[in-house]
């Protein structure tokens, strides 16, 4: 009976002690706001996927991550991002994928990403009139030296 009463007092006291941070170091957390725009005209990109991955001190990406979606104004945010390096990827249909690392070092951060349209693929089978042609004959390698000659 006494042990049950003691546990009822002891367990909440320990929980309160730990929640105050007296026994555990608190991790600093930040709020990160993303703004995704079209590079050519500066208009917002809605429904773009913003993927966040924490990066370890050795530069390798940690497992897991979080995916956000932008609203109609191209905005997305997340509270509770730990300080340190964060790898972000932004994906949207009809645009090149953006990828980069940011250093989260302030309580509030704003990140603006400008997405570009895909570039046309280069083909050797198409004419390229603006390209300088090299019609010169390839150089022949110099003759090999005879090991018996001095």
Image (tube, rainbow, N blue to C red):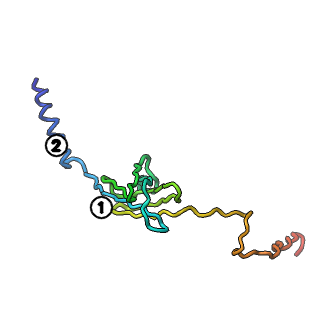
139 relative to 73, above or below: below
12 is higher (above) or lower (below) than 4: below
Q: Earlier in the sequence, mark 2 or mark 1?
A: 2
Instruction: Tell me, yes or no, whether the two marked residues, 2 and 1, touch with CB atoms within 8 Å.
Output: no
Front-most of 44 and 116? 44
Could you tell me which secondary element the residue under label 1 belongs to?
A: strand
**Image quadrant occupied by the C terminus:** bottom right
On residue 57, the disc is: none
Q: Which mark is residue 16?
A: 2
Query: Which residue is located at x 10 percent, y 28 percent?
Result: 5
Residue 3 is situated, as x and y percent measured from the top left of the image, at 13, 27
The image shows residue 78 at horizontal and vertical percentages of: 33, 53
SS class, disc 2: helix
**7 horizontally vs 129: left or right:** left
Counting the numbered discs, the total is 2
Residue ID at (40%, 57%): 86
Circle nearer the viewer, 2 or 1: 1
Residue 27 in picture, x, y percent from top left: 28, 53
Closest to the observer, 115 or 14: 115
Which quadrant holds residue 85?
Answer: bottom left
Count neighbours of disc 2 (C-alpha within 10 A) and say few if under 14, some if 14 to 19, many if 20 or more.
few
Q: Which residue is nearer to you in this view: 32 or 59? A: 32
Tell me the quadrant of the picture where the N terminus can be found: top left
- Taking the view exactly as shown, the residue that stands out farthest to the right is 148
How dense is the environment of label 1, judged by Cα within 10 Å: few (below 14), some, or many (20 and up)? Answer: few
In the picture, measured across the screen, residue 26 lies left or right of residue 60, that is left
- Which residue matches tag 1? 108
Where on the picture, by quarter, is residue 57? Answer: bottom left
- Distance from disc 2 to disc 1, alpha carbons, whole Å, reads 28 Å
Residue 9 placement, left or right of 92 = left
Q: Is residue 131 above or below residue 17?
A: below
């Amino acid at each position: 009976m006494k042990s049950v009463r003691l546990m009822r007092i002891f367990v909440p006291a320990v929980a309160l002690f730990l929640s105050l941070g007296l026994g555990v170091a608190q991790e600093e957390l930040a709020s990160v706001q993303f703004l995704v725009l079209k590079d050519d005209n500066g208009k917002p990109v809605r429904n773009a996927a913003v993927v966040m991955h924490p990066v370890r001190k050795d530069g390798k990406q940690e497992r897991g991550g979080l995916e956000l979606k932008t609203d109609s104004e191209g905005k997305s945010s997340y509270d509770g991002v730990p300080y340190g390096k964060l790898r972000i990827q932004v994906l949207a249909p009809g645009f090149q994928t953006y990828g980069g690392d940011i250093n989260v070092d302030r309580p509030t951060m704003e990140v603006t990403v400008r997405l570009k349209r895909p570039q046309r693929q280069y083909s050797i089978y198409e004419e390229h009139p603006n390209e300088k042609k090299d019609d010169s004959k390839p150089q022949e390698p110099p003759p090999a030296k005879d090991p018996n000659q001095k």
